[in-house]
Image (spheres, rainbow, N blue to C red):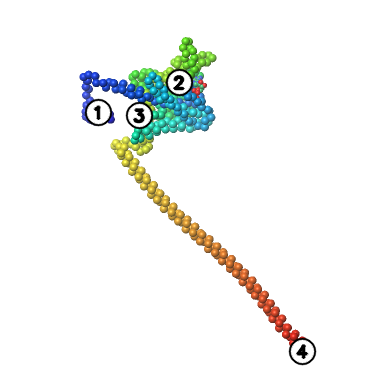
Amino acid sequence: LFLPLTNVFPNEEKRNLSLGGHVGFDSLPDQLVSKSVTQGFCFNILCVGETGIGKSTLMNTLFNTMFENEEASHYQNGVYLRPRTYDLQESNVHLKLTIVDTVGFGDQINKEDSYKPIVDYIDTQFENYLQEELKIKRSLFNYHDTRIHICLYFIAPTGHSLKSLDLVTMKKLDSKVNIIPIIAKADTISKSELHKFKIKIMSELVSNGVQIYQFPTDDEAVSEINASMNAHLPFAVVGSVEEVKVGNKTVRARQYPWGVVQVENESHCDFVKLREMLIRVNMEDLREQTHARHYELYRRCKLEEMGFKDTDPDSQPFSLQETYEAKRKEFLGDLQRKEEEMRQMFVNKVKETEAELKEKRERSLHDKFEQLKRMHQEEKRKVEEKRRDLEEEMNAFNRKKVAAETLSLSQPLKKDKDKKK
Ligand code: GTP
Ligand code: MG
């Protein structure tokens, strides 16, 4: 809608004119502010850090309230992320704040895959946004944007160096989210050690190529403070919801037998610096960077993966329509190839089944023939036996007959002799 003038009229020169009186478009910024205030804002923080490192306490301290807090156990099988959304209001500004906690981070013996659920979570939020953008009926205006605007990475105050889990996780996240590393529970480390620890951490991040969020220095109004704060990274923070009386003031602090650590005292820790940078100066930049850098990268990779491109191989612009046509052709080709494969597979299957059936039939015929043959032989054997029996009977009979005949021949002679007497 707002094409640059040079695109519409390529040879048109811009002329500066002065207005004769008040027109009123100088209220445009006010209109924007009013619109934004009515709409409200949303901001999503991801807290990555081991169990019990002080994530919830710091969030409570930052927003000066008590969020829901459930302690994590140290016996999780894996890492998971727990998002919680709150509606906050300061003056007339509404903030929809989502705090996402890692649960069970650093608790497994094998921590190799600990970063994966975090990466997946961030990607899923990008994917949801992309899906909304690609809908025909989009409602991005009142869409609950859950993309992570800032990842606060809690480093354990060991005074030693980063753990490999920290380096691996930050490296996997740095192209997906703005990272601000913070040294947690900084009251447990001495001043000189803290100084060395900060230098060590920064040099390890640099030598491992981990990109952390830099407070922007291009806006004149905040460039000075942002530049000086960049030099203070990583912030060493202390969290507490305890109120302690110092002099005649009540402050948030941690009380120890040897003294009081005041959360908001800049000579005690960097909590104020973190709050200033994260909430009061750069919240909008964090939101913008998330959309313009991290989401843009995700979107680009995803669309390229899906086959969309801006230019063809000859660097000529390639429209969405052309991409669609090309993809459609590719899809139809694929479909045809698959159909042909299926057909071939079907033919082969039929052939195989036919051969199998034939073999089965032949085998059963053969079996039948064998059975008949066996039956026939059995019958033959039986007949043979019967024949032998009969023969034997016949022989016996003949023998008997012969004996009888011999007997009857000798009998008349005896009779004749008797008659003669
Ligand atoms: P899970 O959600 O269970 O992983 O823990 P968490 O990271 O949210 O830690 P949580 O804020 O519950 O704090 C754990 C313990 O550390 C509590 O006893 C806090 O009082 C203590 N703690 C929190 N912040 C600090 C800090 O800055 N310094 C010190 N010394 N202790 C802290
Ligand atoms: Mg917690």
- Tell me the crowding category of disc 2: few under 14, some 14 to 19, or many 20 or more residues within 10 angstroms, Cα based: few
| Amino acid at dot 3 | Phe
Q: Nearer the viewer, residue 228 or 88?
A: 88
Could you say whether the residue bearing mark 1 is in a helix, strand or loop? Answer: helix
- Side (left or right) of 15 relative to 105: left
The answer to which of 147 and 179 lies nearer the viewer is 147
Residue at mark 2: 65
Find the residue positioned furthest to the top: 248
Residue 189 in the image: above or below residue 389: above
Is the Cβ of the residue at disc 1 closer than 8 Å to that at disc 2? no
Q: Sequence-wise, which precedes: disc 2 or disc 4?
A: 2
Alpha carbons under labels 1 and 3: distance apart:
27 Å
From the image, tell me which residue sits under label 4: 420
The total of numbered circles placed on residues is 4
Q: Which mark is residue 388?
A: none
> Mark number for residue 141?
3
Which residue is labeled 1 in the image?
5
Kind of residue at disc 1 = Leu
| First of labels 1, 2 by sequence position | 1
